[in-house]
Image (cartoon, rainbow, N blue to C red):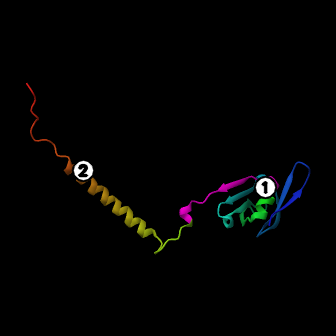
Amino acid sequence: MAALLEVDRHMTTIKASCPSCGDVELTPHQVRLVVCSVKSWSYYAFMCTTCHDEVRKPAGRDVVALLISGGVVAEPWNVPAEVLEEHDGPTLNYDDVLDFALWLEQADLLAAAAAVQGHRPRTTAPETAA
């Protein structure tokens, strides 16, 4: 969990933990806080100052409040409602997408052929008034 340390009156240091290196000290600008409309998906992330790996951890309500109070700017993440819908049936795979793309190509060819047959040029010139 992240913790705040006051280095001086103008600079807040955030103490976080890297799974490889242990505790690291960060400034608010080094921490990314993403607050999701699905609360359990909120997280904070930072680049470890020692090993340079990106570390991502869940951010519950208390962690969000703590980081914001330390000067970290929260990024809102609004999940579309469709993501949360329940779906029946098997999941789509690469072959399904490829089959759909091939079907669309055939449908385009069919539509183009139908459009050409539907538009027939006139065989006789229209009569004009004299």
Q: Amino acid at mark 1?
A: Ile
Name the quadrant containing residue 17.
Answer: bottom right
Q: Amino acid at mark 2?
A: Ala
**Residue occupying the point 42% across, 65% down:** 97
Q: Which residues are magenta?
A: 68-83
User: Is 48 in the magenta?
Assistant: no
Left or right: 27 in relation to 122: right
Q: Residue furthest right?
A: 8
Name the quadrant containing residue 66.
Answer: bottom right
Residue beneath disc 1: 68
Residue beneath disc 2: 115
User: Is 82 in the magenta?
Assistant: yes
Please, what secondary structure does the residue beneath circle 1 have?
helix
Residue 6, x across and y down, in percent: 90, 55
Name the quadrant containing residue 36.
Answer: bottom right
Q: Residue furthest bottom?
A: 89
Residue 115, x across and y down, in percent: 24, 50
**Residue occupying the point 92% across, 51% down:** 8
